[in-house]
Image (spheres, coloured by chain):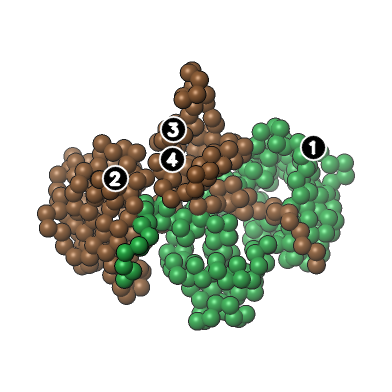
Amino acid sequence: MKRRSHKPFDPLAAALEQVGDRWTLIIVRALMNGPQRYSDLRTFMVGSGSNLLADRLRRLADVGIVTRNAGSRAGSNVTYQLTDRGWALAPVIEDLVRFGLRALITGPSDGAAPFDREVFDHGWAMAAPEVAVNETYEWTVDDIVFTLEVIVEGLQIVRTPGPAKRPAVKLRTTAETFEQVLAQKSSLGQAVRSKSLTISGRPAAIERMFFAIGFPPDQIKTLNDAATG
Amino acid sequence: MPPTGHHHNRFCPLTMALDVLGDPWSLLVVRALMLGPRPRGSLCQFLTGLDGSALNDTLGALVTADVIRCDRDELSQADATFELTERGASLEPAVQTLTRWGLTELLLIGRTAEAQQHPDRFDQTWTIAGVADPTDEVYGWTIDGTSFALEVAGMTMTRTLGRPREPAATLDTSFEVFDAVLFGEMTMSEALMRDELKLSGSAESISRMFRAVGFPPELLDAISKP
């Protein structure tokens, strides 16, 4: 049979053709914080080639996901922002964030090997550097203890098996509870109230911790409700 | 444990997800398995354009990431069967949202008027291969007042803006209703009864039309019952 290069009339394939590559959704997520300049967006693109951001922004503008606004002054003021069609991708990003968080926190699902020490690049979250502080957090998930250490100078998070020396926050929960919170079957606030998740530490440190690991912001807010209610 | 020189991943949940799923094929595999376990051979028909070795790479990466599992040690065996893990099944909302989002593109709702002027040709092997009696014919669709023709010829389908002259079947509805039917919030017969979705043409043509665009067959039962 002759090979054809036409794409299928398939909604999922059509969506993936526009946003299914490694970087496009990372740009869209960055723009969910509001309009950004080119130089701001580069912060989120650690590890990408130099032309990639320009190329993706052009493509995103062509298909109507992003608009480019020339500011009042020439040159430096150009910003990029999401169109309504771009904003319609927000739920997809939230779903994928939950999927990724499971892997970062609960480790391999077969429970065979608790994870090794690993250093993560953290540049993407440093778009708001005033929030970051050098501190450690101790997590216990299903009796497996590990430490998350934020190192502002190297823009890194280090995950180490075992307890922390002087953790700013201690969190203890089960993988099941964590899954339920991520699947939005339960909120963080509800999990705290029902004691299936316990957190100790100063409220500001707790908020920084969840921010640093990329927890969905709407979930972080439910903690305050638990504290006041 | 890898010593120095170890690649630093980002401690970023979205990057972590896209490391596994950020390619054009992975979520198509996940969608194909959302209806239940499938042998390797039947996966291929959902993945037009993916050759055997690329399919092995995609399946291997998804097994490693605990998104799917295989009943054989050797993934490339013809009778190997794949299914979603619990982790893979948790991707269903993401697949559904992306499908809705992509639909606006195909139904000419999400695009600028300029981009709509050119006919677009699609490879429909993935849907038409499953139709018992493939027939070359033209369908007329009107969604939210925008009319376009879908012309099936062999294994391809061409979409052109405007009304076709002699359509074998027509559909007229709003995007909102179409979306609700597609995602099970409203049945096809409800939409027809309320006159929020109008169909014309012979039952056979209407059935072929929906199959050609890849409409889930289980949603079509309502049409055969008058």
Residue at the extreme top of the image, as rendered: A72
Of residues A76 and B143, which is closer to you in this image? A76
Please, what is the three-letter code of the amino acid marked with disc 3? Gln
> Label 1 neighbourhood size at 10 Å, few (<14), some (14-19), many (20+)?
some
**Circle 3 chain:** A
Image disc number at residue A36: 3
Residue at the spot x=57%, y=64% of the render?
B29
> Label 4 neighbourhood size at 10 Å, few (<14), some (14-19), many (20+)?
some
Chain shown brown: that is A
Instruction: Indicate which label's residue lies in the foreground, 4 or 3.
Output: 4
Image disc number at residue A42: 4
Of residues A58 and B160, which is closer to you in this image? A58
Image disc number at residue B162: 1
Instruction: Indicate which label's residue lies in the foreground, 2 or 4.
Output: 4
Residue at the spot x=22%, y=41% of the render?
A224
Disc 2 from disc 4: Cα separation: 20 Å
Q: Are marks 4 and 1 on the same chain?
A: no
Judged from the image, the secondary structure of the residue bearing numbered disc 2 is helix
Work out whether residue B202 can be spotted. no
Q: Are marks 4 and 3 on the same chain?
A: yes
Label 2 close to label 4 by CB (< 8 Å): no
* Image coords of residue A86 (percent x, y): 52, 38
Please, what is the three-letter code of the amino acid marked with disc 1? Gly
Chain shown green: that is B
Q: Are marks 3 and 1 on the same chain?
A: no
Please, what is the three-letter code of the amino acid marked with disc 2? Phe
Q: Quadrant of residue B135?
A: bottom right
Label 4 close to label 3 by CB (< 8 Å): no
Give the mark, 4 or 3, whose residue is nearer the N terminus. Answer: 3
* Image coords of residue A204 (percent x, y): 19, 41
Q: Which residue is mark 2?
A: A211
Label 2 close to label 1 by CB (< 8 Å): no
